[in-house]
Amino acid sequence: MIVEDVERGGGAVSVPMAVAVLAMILAIGLAVDGVRAAQGLAHADAVAEEAARAAGQALDTAALIGGVAAVEPAQAAAAARSYLDAAQATGTVTVTAPDTIRVEVTLTRPTILLGLIGQDQITSRGSAEAILVPTVPGAGP
C-alpha cells in the first residue's frame, strides 16, 4: 500500500481572508449601530415632542380669562422636565414666548458591535416646539 503525503494547508487562514472577515464584521457593526442611531434620532424627537406637549398643558388661567392662550412658565417647564425624567432623557426646556415652548433632548444608548473598536455609545439629539393655538368653543374643527 502506497501512502501519499499530501499537504492540505493545515487549517491555516490566509491573510486576505482574515482581513475580509474583519471588514465584514465591521460593516455589519456599522449597519446595526447605524440603524440604532437612526432610531435614536427618531426617539429623541418623539420624546421632545411629548415633553413640549406636556408643557403646553400648563395653561395660565388668568391669561385664558382674558382671551389669550399662554402657559405658566414655571409649571410648563416643570411638566416638561417631569416627562423627560420619566423617559430617562436629559434636556432643556425653554418658554420662548407666552404661547411657545421649546424642548431639546439628548439620549445616549450603548452600541452593539462598534464597542469592539472603541465606540461605546450613540448620542442622539432631538428637539421640538409646541405653540399654543387658541380656538373658539363651538366654532368647529
Image (cartoon, rainbow, N blue to C red):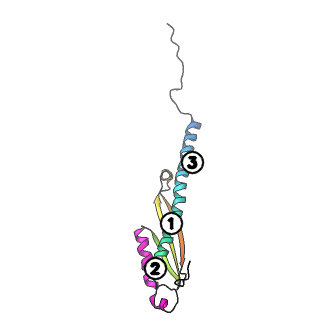
- Of the numbered discs 2 and 1, the one sitting upstream in the chain is 1
CA–CA distance in space, label 2 to label 1: 20 Å
Residue 56 position (above or below residue 30): below
Could you tell me which residue is drawn at 47 percent across and 73 percent down? 51
Task: Kindly identify which numbered label has been placed on residue 27.
Answer: 3
Q: Which residue is mark 2?
A: 57
Picture coordinates of residue 117, whole percent (x, y): 51, 51
CA–CA distance in space, label 3 to label 2: 45 Å
Farthest residue, direction top: 1
- Of the numbered discs 3 and 2, the one sitting upstream in the chain is 3
Residue 135 located within the stretch drawn in magenta: no
Label 2 Cα neighbours within 10 Å, binned few <14 / some 14-19 / many ≥20: some
CA–CA distance in space, label 1 to label 3: 25 Å
Q: Nearer the viewer, residue 135 or 63?
A: 135
Q: Secondary structure at mark 2?
A: loop
Q: Secondary structure at mark 1?
A: helix
Secondary structure character of the magenta stretch overall: helix
Could you tell me which residue is drawn at 45 percent across and 88 percent down? 61
Picture coordinates of residue 110, whole percent (x, y): 46, 57
Q: Which residue is mark 1?
A: 44
Q: Which residues are magenta?
A: 61-86
